[in-house]
């Protein structure tokens, strides 16, 4: 397939790897790196480990959707079924629900922290000790400092 006719941002790959499931919107740079748009080239590109999102073990299977049309289908039906079972409500709705759950956990945690008396906090990264009852960000290095002394 001629990648010059593909519009980045409207193309995504959904994949099943050894460790997880993922989705990635393909950019113009991704399309150039892939070259000829074939299953073999895409699999080679995904497994190069040059991107932080690709470091989940080797990709076992994937499919590519371009403009709402499946351009490259799943190679194995069991991987398509695993994807559908994992995201029955759709990938973006799943991610939105996960984000909301995390925000709720963060709010509860921040509430517990703000209710505590002022204590010494030791930064996990640089070892700085400072007094706070709210901030979990180290004033010295900007690192996350969740350890109360």
Image (cartoon, rainbow, N blue to C red):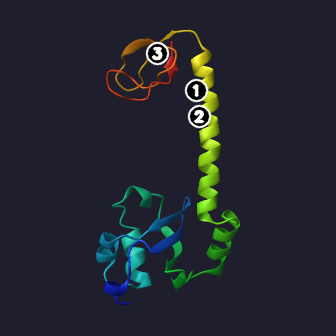
Provide the residue designation for mark 2.
Answer: 106
Q: CA distance from mark 3 to mark 1?
A: 15 Å
Taking the spot 37% from the left edge, 26% from the top edge, the residue there is 125
Taking the spot 62% from the left edge, 74% from the top edge, the residue there is 79
Label 3–label 1 contact, CB within 8 A:
no
Residue 105 position (above or below residue 93) = above
x then y, percent, for residue 10: 45, 75
Provide the residue designation for mark 3.
Answer: 121
Q: Is residue 72 visible?
A: no
The answer to which quarter of the image holds residue 25 is bottom left
Disc on res. 93: none
Q: CA distance from mark 3 to mark 2?
A: 18 Å
x then y, percent, for residue 63: 53, 78
129 vs 147, left or right, is left
Give the camera-side residue of 17 and 68. Answer: 68
Taking the spot 53% from the left edge, 74% from the top edge, the residue there is 61
Label 2–label 1 contact, CB within 8 A:
yes
Provide the residue designation for mark 1.
Answer: 110
x then y, percent, for residue 20: 56, 59
147 vs 8, left or right, is right
Secondary structure beneath disc 1?
helix
Q: Is residue 145 visible?
A: yes
Dot 1: few (<14), some (14–19), or many (≥20) neighbours within 10 Å?
some
x then y, percent, for residue 15: 53, 69
């Amino acid at each position: 397939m001629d990648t010059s006719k593909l519009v980045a941002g409207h193309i995504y790959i959904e994949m099943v790897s050894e460790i997880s499931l993922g989705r990635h919107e393909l950019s113009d740079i991704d399309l150039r790196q892939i070259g000829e748009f074939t299953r073999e080239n895409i699999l080679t590109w995904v497994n190069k480990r040059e991107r932080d999102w690709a470091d989940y073990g080797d990709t076992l299977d994937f499919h590519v959707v371009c403009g709402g049309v499946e351009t490259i289908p799943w190679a194995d039906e069991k991987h398509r079924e695993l994807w559908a079972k994992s995201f029955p409500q759709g990938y973006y709705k799943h991610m939105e629900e996960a984000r909301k759950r995390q925000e709720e956990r963060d709010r509860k945690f921040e509430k517990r922290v703000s209710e505590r008396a002022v204590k010494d906090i030791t930064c996990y990264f640089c070892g700085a000790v400072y007094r706070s009852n709210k901030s979990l960000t180290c004033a010295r290095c900007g690192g996350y400092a969740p350890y109360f002394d």
